[in-house]
Amino acid sequence: MRRSRPRPRAVAAAAGATALTAAALIAAPMSGAAAAAGHVTGAVKAVPAVAGHRLIKGVGSPLTIAQCQAKWGINCYTPLQYRQAYDLKPLYRAGVTGKGRTIVIVDSFGSPTIQHDLDVYSAQFGMASTHVQVVKWGDVPPFDPTNPDHTGWAGESTLDVEMAHATAPDAHIVLVETGVAETEGVTGLPEMMDAEKAMIDHGVGDVITQSFGATENTFPGFAQGDFSSIGKLRYAFKDAQRHGVTVLASSGDGGATDATEDGSTNYPYRVNSWPSSDPLVTSVGGTQLHLDDAGDRTAPDSVYNDYGAGGGGQSHVFARPLYQNGVRQVVGAQRGTPDISMSAAVDGGAWVYSSFDPTAVGWDVYGGTSEASPLFSGIVALADQLAGHRVGDIHQALYALAKGTAKFSGIVDVADGTNNSYDGVTGYTAVKGYDMATGVGTLDAARFVPALALTSWPR
């Protein structure tokens, strides 16, 4: 998940749009005037963005688990191992690959090498690539590989695109690049929300994934109990609900805490972040996978908690939504996050290929819930295809399925007793049923995708 403060790094880091208007929208950059609509000026200083947690940088080729363990002391996973771990192969054999569905990814600045990098990534693992259509929203500056803000977001864009493709190989991907870096507070968020609303209004996208967020406490007015600065940014999500578009967001990488306004440290108490905390957004948390070379589990999933920790906890802005009434004993009177979780641990990180930085061309290992949200966006695209329509806001279906058996629902509880305590702030423990460490748990796609498709309403 994109945050405005530097991330720890290892010392050993290596040298279907359905309308013509939609097609036209994708083909041409957005005007600066359109992008400026609804802009709110933030009081925070823009500082370099960093994509998730990049522990390993610029390796010549992906290594095996044993080699990663020997060289860096962590597990490193490929998309082929993810496909086995999440039981995606039966869906692919049945032709459920995301074909005909569109995933929208929104990031500041984007990456100038995104198509080339996805092509190399796909070829490495014997997967067909797909065309990434880029929409430039507003005045997106020329890419500067010496600007850490640009390279940080390019890494985020690359991670998002490659993870979405890993789970939904035939889904159409639209990368929306905005021209203002999102930081703590409102800075950059109006441009992102304007871009999302434009995509929705023009029929572009069935699911939107957001690997960014800002701590609720950093928004103007929060300390006085005035949450209007967040409320004024919700228009894209309300529009998505009207059009049946699923909206996802990473739950964060700070466990039960998160970044202060200047991004230099975390709050010393429990906080939450937006848009993950928004009741109209499905919050995607983080797990740690324990896999062998074939992608089979050697142990049940744990809570992501190594170079960061899966975000989760109570919102201080939003009251408990109706769909969480069944877990009121856990979330209390407030909106609780996350809703569901996928792979995010750095120890068990994802191989990603990038070439936007000429000084570090090659393979990187990433973790963070920036990985989990795009992975889950592919799962939603599969459900959209199988259902024959957009599954829309999945909250009701998700919590209803969680009440059933895993054999039918495909929801796999994470209950191994690990937690998301981080940076001195006590978090939440993964226990039986819903918890604010992993939500309802994780998933077995071969069961979850059909169940989600069956329990959703056509739009």
Image: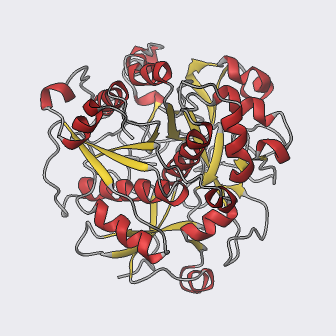
Quarter holding the C terminus is top right
Q: How many numbered marks are there?
A: 0
Q: Quadrant of residue 192?
A: top left
Which residue is at the front of the view, 381 or 250? Answer: 381
The colour scheme is secondary structure
Q: Is residue 419 visible?
A: yes
Q: Quadrant of residue 385?
A: top right
Q: Is residue 311 visible?
A: no
Q: Is residue 285 above or below residue 232?
A: below
Q: Residue at x 27, y 33 (%)?
A: 20
Q: Is residue 312 above or below residue 424?
A: above
**In the rendered view, does 266 fall on the left or right side of 107?**
right
Q: Residue at x 60, y 48 (%)?
A: 310
Residue 418: % across, % down:
75, 53
Q: Residue at x 75, y 48 (%)?
A: 447
**In the rendered view, does 6 fall on the left or right side of 191?**
right
Residue 290: % across, % down:
71, 67
Which residue is at the front of the view, 51 or 171? Answer: 171
Q: Is residue 179 above or below residue 240?
A: below
**In the rendered view, does 307 fall on the left or right side of 108?**
right
Residue 135: % across, % down:
25, 43
Residue 171: % across, % down:
46, 50
Q: Quadrant of residue 31?
A: top left
